[in-house]
């Protein structure tokens, strides 16, 4: 993801939805979106007439920023989803969910996807007993993600059990927190993604 040096909470406020970009802080009363649920800037509170195209664009931007990927990458995922059998929108979300950095986040070993991405790049995890340092790697059923022995005492990972207990783990994943291990039980389904996303708007946007 291109480096963004601004306040992450501004992104949530701009997209009009909590994207959980700051991890546990987003679950507390310190969350900026909860305190100021309107777009940033002087005109943030003003009501504007929004076109159909703007609605579709904002939905795409919301999902892209939530998973922390660039426009070129996002469009590539859409093309892959469109070529697969089934519903394009659901295929797109499944591809994004199967990214290694997202799986690490979903397993509870990171407070945010950005943190999970950094941890993957630093070689904190192995995938099927092989070093995995590419955040965009696609996991498949039966894959096993394990924390490298030397990293198991890191403060972030030491809190993994508490994070998992609080956030929960999706049904398509299985976590063995005491042994710093996670596995892929099945492919993610639409109902496994609880975040409010209207993927059909993204399909309509790219179909224009």
Image (tube, rainbow, N blue to C red):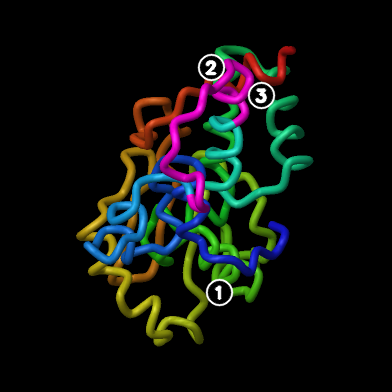
Is 49 one of the magenta-colored residues? yes
Would residue 2 appear left or right of 104 to someone viewing this image? Answer: right
**SS category of the residue bearing label 1:** loop
In-front residue for pair 171/112: 112
Identify the residue shown where x is 69% and y is 38%. Answer: 74
Place of residue 108 in the rendered image (x, y in percent of width and height, measured from the top left): 36, 61
**Residue drawn where x is 51% and y is 58% of the image:** 113
- Dot label at residue 81: 3
Q: Which residue is rendered at x = 42% and y = 27% of the image?
A: 189
Magenta stretch: residue 186 in it? no
Residue 6, by quadrant, is bottom right
Of labels 1 and 2, the one closer to you: 2
Q: Give the range drawn in magenta.
A: 40-57
The dominant secondary structure in magenta is loop
Res 177 quadrant in image: bottom left
**10 Å neighbourhood of mark 1: few (<14), some, or many (≥20)?**
many
Labels 1 and 2: the sequence-earlier one: 1
**Badge nearest the viewer, 2 or 3:** 2
- Position of residue 123 measured from the top left corner of the image (x, y, whole percent): 62, 74
Cβ atoms at labels 3 and 1 below 8 Å apart: no
Compared with 206, 129 (above or below) is below
Going from the N terminus, do you reach mark 2 or mark 3 first?
Answer: 3
Mark 1 = which residue?
124
Residue at the spot of label 2 = 200
Where the C terminus falls, by quadrant?
top right
Asked whether 119 or 123 is in front, the reply is: 119
């Amino acid at each position: 993801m291109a480096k963004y040096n601004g306040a992450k909470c501004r992104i949530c406020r701009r997209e009009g939805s909590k994207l959980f970009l700051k991890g546990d802080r987003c679950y507390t009363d310190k969350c900026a979106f909860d305190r100021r649920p309107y777009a940033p800037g002087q005109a943030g509170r003003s009501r504007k007439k929004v076109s159909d195209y703007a609605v579709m664009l904002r939905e795409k931007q919301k999902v892209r920023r939530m998973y922390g990927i660039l426009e070129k990458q996002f469009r590539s995922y859409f093309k892959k989803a469109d070529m697969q059998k089934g519903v394009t929108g659901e295929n797109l979300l499944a591809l994004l969910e199967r990214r290694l950095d997202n799986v690490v986040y979903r397993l509870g070993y990171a407070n945010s996807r950005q943190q999970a991405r950094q941890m993957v790049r630093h070689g904190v995890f192995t995938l099927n007993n092989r070093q995995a340092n590419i955040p965009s790697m696609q996991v498949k059923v039966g894959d096993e993600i394990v924390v490298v022995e030397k990293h198991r005492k890191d403060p972030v990972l030491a809190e993994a059990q508490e994070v998992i207990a609080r956030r929960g783990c999706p049904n398509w994943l299985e976590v063995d927190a005491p042994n710093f291990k996670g596995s892929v039980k099945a492919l993610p389904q639409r109902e496994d993604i609880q975040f409010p996303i209207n993927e059909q708007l993204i399909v309509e946007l790219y179909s224009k």
